[in-house]
Image: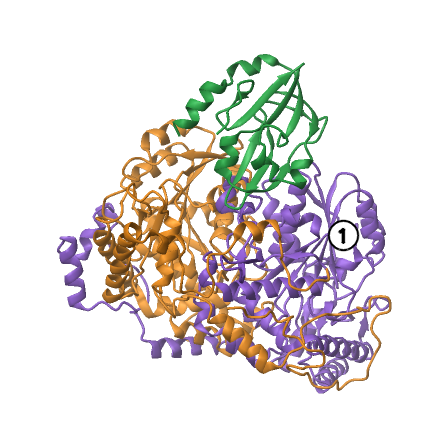
Chain colours: A purple, B green, C orange
């Protein structure tokens, strides 16, 4: 399959090599390990494979058939048709990393535009060509801080209101390093919006303070006191963000963040069961040299014409090898392109419209749910963006099951990650949800309560 | 290529000059030439740090390469040349003068005995 | 060429895609958090489409021409992969849906874990790693966890051959291992004497790329592995070059303990201009418990009437989560499609043709270019990109001159142990005419180097740009187009 060799071609090639059969090229492999019988399914033609994959996919229920209020890190937004149409050009997706700038100006300029858009969105000076996802970007923020302080500061404070998966990934990355402490996300420190206990943990040994904005529960919290406290102790502050929310909210750069990271999936990437997405990673001018991953810069060619290249590559693993701070060797190329096209075709107004619709509909939904018997809006005094938490009188598992019977994915059961939030359900509302959808949800919940 | 007589050299292309127990340390002409245009210098130590021979001073980056620079002697860091951070091209222009990197109060001058003199270093470079 | 940036194309008031008006009552934005301005571009949809179309045309891609980039396996990316990954039932599933609503996804991942393990000769696999380097990190973390679990805290040394890719030492350093360089012998194999002198009870493991970055299968691989195992170390296989041995041999059976694949190299998923990759990691039996959390397993066995129930399970001694959600699922669908279409027969055919193509070109070129390790190669080979009689010409010049002939340059300046390296990998999907033309062009360039060296020094002449000023880019850092921030 996909090998164009005719019998005659093979003969010509074997003759030029002076051998009789292709197998002779593999005689270096110990004979007892050569040509194993692999236990794999029989090969399929394209038509059969297409049908097989359709059949596998049909065992899923997708957000096309189910009304979904699931968020918790991945959001079901409308993707303008131009995004995927352009992405499917072979010149984009069958190109490699732009190491040869003369034949990669398209990819390079697109990344440069991505960097520019993310800097604008986050209010930061410098953005790289992306990390794998929001979670690994969070881990890379910690690695950056560790390297910034040359390993001398050992405390990494992470708010409990940061996405639990980000915290888990960060812990995995630092697992072998017994001297590094990741703190601040225990139940005792808590999730209070005033963050008093959390701020109290910051000291001279703190390398990094990581918070989320809006936080995992969708809340928009004022981090000024926290950022001031961190800076007073010389620590760096990283803020994990939702890019859609930043269309409306003061960018973290203006709040004083040193590092801004986030999950780029809302910027034109399908849910695709969790990936591929992208992690954006932006820093202040001061941290420019510490940023890991690829960076595209503008320059000129020998004739003086504008050109783009990968720059500051001496920071990277292929040159620094064991001395590099990160081993990252790719970026989410095609996903950064999706994000760039998404932000461009929506443009200044369209992007704000998306964010505003999410905000308005989420607030309508929260208000409606708050009026359903047996449900009460949690964190009611704290502003939120497009995700919110309701407390249920009944176990969330039962509620979700009931909703499922009505083809509704009701949201995220917070009790899985937060014992203190047992019976708390988190719902996300995007521009794709209509008023009718929200009213259907509340009607079903009413019915269940009175059943 | 310059190999000043009064300096001592390491096979890793650092030079050191000791006067009154104070060592000035930099990278050699050969090293700057091999690196080509230096675009960035990053120090990993601060004044007053206690260092041992072999510890890292920092990293020098050019467009295509990154080189780590090491202390040839043990002692206490007295001064770091911040000028090379602001204008890294000094390292290419005058590696033995304005491009010095750090000054160290030497704790054990006998460590210098193992280093190469100018003639030995020149021969070593020509062999590479 | 100069294509303006999207910011330069912006014109206040111009609109692209519009959103519907809100169907719910308006509420005010949170006080004190309102953003003052958002300077995003304002351009029409058509202008945006033309911009990104024109930009795409400045790229060389597999779909536009030959791409013999060593160690990157730029093989054809079948269009069917793109179609299947976009099937609504895959593309529109949320990663946190209840497991019973995503049995199709879980089945596919479970089967892909099994197929990848079978192809490599291993006991199990994780699909979570997002790229090869990420897979290496998983492998190194598992090696660390394995020794720690056994109380072998003194095992801190990781052996890395001098021919290794930079990610190997970078990964080992991230995990805190002490990196010990391992020499390559005159035939391009691991230097056995050097290896023996480096192993003791401080050995954590060896990271070995086989076939290695010279395109050579290590002639002593069994012995190399035995030496490491006897000293109590584990052997990590960097599977960057697995395309050479698909269906021909199984690294797990030879004794490798861990191996990562690059789905974007070996299993035909697109490189995407630098990503997304996908780097599944396979392990031997004794490491199954250490795999990242979660893996896909069978929760309830099926019977004649019902399929099994698939679900996410946590390995007993897991190193933890390495990525949000489940890895690059969209890439898993593509790789699954590819393997389904090739089967065992097709995989072996792919490897055989990849190796045949490489040997054919090596044979044709070795008279005109120095071949430092002259023996039968695997799927790629490394030439020296310079001649003693043409002192001014470097590998870079040859690489850039190839662009003028519509061919993407080979990997150059890697591996580091070959002077002025040109690393050439044709892949199995290229036909004989393409290989012959490449050979012809390479011979022509060798001639031009002697007769018209300036043609090489100033190349490319027929590309969207001339050679770029990388020093200027690094010194005058312009990293975004909008002046504010």
In depth, the one of A388 and B116 nearer the eye is B116
Q: Going by the image, does C239 lie left or right of C441?
A: right
Which residue does the image show at 54% across and 32% down from the upper left? C153
Quadrant in which residue C441 is drawn: bottom left
The residue closer to the viewer here, B121 or C229, is B121
Residue C385 screen position, x and y as percent: 33, 47
Q: Viewed as shown, does residue C58 lie left or right of A428?
A: left
Q: Which residue is mark 1?
A: A187
Q: How many marks?
A: 1
Badge 1 sits on which subunit? A
Q: Is residue A110 above or below residue A202?
A: below
Is residue A30 shown left or right of residue A175?
left
From where the camera sits, is residue C74 visible? Answer: no
Whether residue B114 is visible to the viewer of this picture, yes or no, is yes
**Image x and y of residue A416, in percent:** 67, 61
Please identify the quarter of the rendering in which residue C115 is found: bottom left
Mark 1 element type? loop
Residue A164 at x, y percent in the picture:
67, 57
Name the one closer to the observer, A256 or C285: A256
- Horizontal and vertical percent for residue C131? 49, 56
Local crowd at mark 1 within 10 Å, few (<14), some, or many (≥20)?
few
Residue C344 vs C220, above or below: the answer is: below
- Locate the C terminus of chain C and report the quarter of the image it occupies: bottom right
């Amino acid at each position: 399959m996909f090998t164009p060799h005719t019998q005659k071609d093979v003969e010509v090639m074997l003759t030029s090599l002076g051998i009789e059969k292709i197998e002779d090229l593999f005689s270096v492999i110990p004979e007892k390990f050569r040509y194993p019988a692999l236990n794999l399914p029989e090969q399929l033609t394209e038509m059969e494979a297409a049908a097989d994959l359709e059949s596998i996919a049909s065992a899923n229920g997708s957000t096309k058939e189910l009304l979904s209020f699931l968020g918790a890190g991945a959001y079901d937004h409308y993707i303008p048709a131009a995004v995927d149409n352009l992405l499917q050009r072979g010149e984009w997706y069958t190109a490699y990393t732009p190491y040869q700038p003369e034949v990669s100006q398209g990819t390079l300029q697109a990344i440069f535009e991505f960097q520019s858009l993310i800097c604008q969105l986050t209010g930061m000076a410098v953005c790289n060509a992306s990390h794998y996802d929001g979670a690994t970007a969070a881990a890379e923020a910690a690695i950056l801080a560790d390297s910034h302080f040359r390993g001398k500061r050992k405390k990494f404070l992470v708010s409990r209101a940061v996405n639990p998966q980000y915290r888990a990934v960060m812990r995995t990355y630092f697992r072998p390093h017994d001297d590094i402490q990741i703190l601040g996300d225990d139940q005792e420190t808590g999730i209070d919006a005033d963050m008093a206990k959390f701020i109290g943990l910051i000291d001279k040994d703190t390398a990094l303070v990581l918070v989320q904005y809006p936080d995992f529960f969708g809340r928009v919290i004022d981090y000024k006191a926290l950022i001031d406290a961190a800076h007073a102790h010389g620590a760096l502050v990283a803020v994990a963000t939702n890019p859609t929310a930043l269309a409306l909210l003061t960018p973290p750069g203006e709040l004083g963040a040193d590092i801004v990271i986030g999950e780029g999936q809302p910027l034109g990437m399908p849910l695709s069961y969790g990936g591929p997405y992208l992690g954006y990673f932006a820093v202040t001018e001061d941290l420019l040299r510490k940023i890991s991953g690829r960076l595209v810069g503008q320059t000129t060619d020998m004739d003086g014409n504008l050109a783009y290249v990968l720059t500051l590559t001496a920071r990277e693993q292929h040159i620094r090898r064991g001395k590099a701070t990160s081993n990252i060797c790719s970026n989410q190329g095609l996903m950064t392109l999706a994000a760039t096209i998404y932000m461009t075709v929506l443009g200044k107004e369209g992007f704000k419209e998306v964010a505003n619709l999410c905000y308005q509909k989420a607030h309508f939904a929260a208000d409606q749910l708050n009026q359903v018997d047996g449900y009460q809006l949690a964190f009611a005094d704290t502003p939120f963006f497009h995700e919110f938490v309701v407390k249920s009188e009944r176990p969330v598992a039962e509620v979700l099951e009931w909703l499922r019977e009505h083809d509704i994915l009701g949201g995220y059961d917070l009790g899985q990650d937060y014992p203190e939030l047992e019976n708390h359900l988190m719902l996300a509302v995007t521009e794709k949800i209509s008023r009718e959808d929200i009213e259907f949800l509340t009607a079903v919940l009413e019915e269940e309560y009175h059943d | 290529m310059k190999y000043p007589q009064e300096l001592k050299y390491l096979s890793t292309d650092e030079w050191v000059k000791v006067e009154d127990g104070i060592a000035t340390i930099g990278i050699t002409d050969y090293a700057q030439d091999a690196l080509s245009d230096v675009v960035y210098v990053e120090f990993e130590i601060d004044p007053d740090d206690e260092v041992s021979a072999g510890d890292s001073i920092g990293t020098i980056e050019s467009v295509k390469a990154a080189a780590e620079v090491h202390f040839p002697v043990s002692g206490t860091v007295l001064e770091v040349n911040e000028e090379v951070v602001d204008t890294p091209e000094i390292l290419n222009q005058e590696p033995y003068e304005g491009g010095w990197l750090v000054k160290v109060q030497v704790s054990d001058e006998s460590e210098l005995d193992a280093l190469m003199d100018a003639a030995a270093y020149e021969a070593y470079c020509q062999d590479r | 060429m100069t294509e303006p940036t999207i910011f330069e194309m912006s014109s206040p008031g111009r609109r692209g895609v519009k959103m519907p008006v809100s169907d719910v009552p308006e509420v005010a934005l949170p006080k004190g958090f309102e953003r003052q301005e958002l300077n995003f571009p304002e351009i029409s949809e058509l202008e945006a489409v033309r911009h990104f179309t024109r930009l795409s045309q400045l790229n060389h891609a597999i779909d536009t021409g030959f791409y013999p980039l060593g160690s990157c396996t730029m093989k054809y990316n079948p269009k069917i992969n793109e179609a299947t990954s976009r099937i609504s039932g895959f593309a529109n599933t949320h990663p946190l849906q209840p497991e019973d609503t995503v049995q199709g996804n879980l089945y596919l991942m479970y089967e892909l874990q099994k197929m990848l393990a079978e192809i490599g000769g291993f006991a199990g696999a994780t699909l979570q790693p997002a790229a090869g380097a990420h897979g290496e990190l998983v492998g190194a973390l598992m090696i660390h966890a394995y020794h720690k679990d056994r109380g072998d805290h003194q095992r801190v040394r990781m052996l890395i051959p001098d021919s290794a890719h930079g990610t190997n030492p970078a990964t080992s350093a991230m995990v805190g291992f002490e990196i010990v360089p391992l020499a390559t012998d005159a035939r391009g194999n691991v230097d056995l004497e050097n290896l023996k002198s480096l192993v003791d009870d401080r050995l954590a493991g060896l990271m070995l790329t086989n076939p290695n970055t010279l395109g050579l299968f290590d002639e002593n691989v069994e012995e190399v592995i035995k030496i490491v195992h006897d000293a109590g170390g584990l052997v990590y296989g960097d599977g960057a070059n697995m395309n050479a041995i698909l269906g021909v041999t199984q690294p797990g059976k030879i004794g490798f303990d861990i191996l990562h694949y690059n789905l974007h190299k070996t299993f035909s998923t697109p490189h995407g201009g630098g990503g997304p990759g996908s780097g599944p990691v396979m392990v031997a039996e004794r490491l199954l418990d250490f795999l990242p959390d979660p893996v896909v397993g069978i929760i309830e066995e099926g019977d004649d009437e019902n399929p099994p129930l698939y679900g996410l399970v946590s390995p007993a001694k897991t190193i933890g989560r390495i990525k949000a959600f489940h890895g690059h699922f969209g890439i898993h669908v593509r790789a699954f499609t590819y393997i389904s279409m090739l089967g065992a027969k097709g995989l072996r055919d792919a490897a055989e043709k990849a190796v045949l193509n490489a040997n054919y070109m090596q044979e044709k070129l070795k008279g005109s270019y120095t071949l430092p390790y002259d023996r039968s190669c695997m799927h790629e080979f490394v030439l020296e990109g310079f001649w003693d009689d043409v002192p001014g010409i470097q590998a870079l010049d040859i690489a850039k001159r190839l662009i003028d002939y519509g061919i993407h340059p080979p990997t150059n300046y890697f591996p580091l142990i070959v002077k002025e390296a040109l690393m050439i990998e044709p892949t199995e999907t290229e036909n004989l005419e393409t290989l012959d033309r490449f050979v012809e062009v390479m011979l022509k360039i060798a001639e031009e180097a002697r007769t018209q060296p300036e043609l090489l020094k100033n190349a490319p002449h027929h590309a969207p740009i001339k050679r770029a000023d990388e020093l200027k880019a690094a010194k005058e850092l312009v990293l975004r187009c909008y002046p504010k921030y």
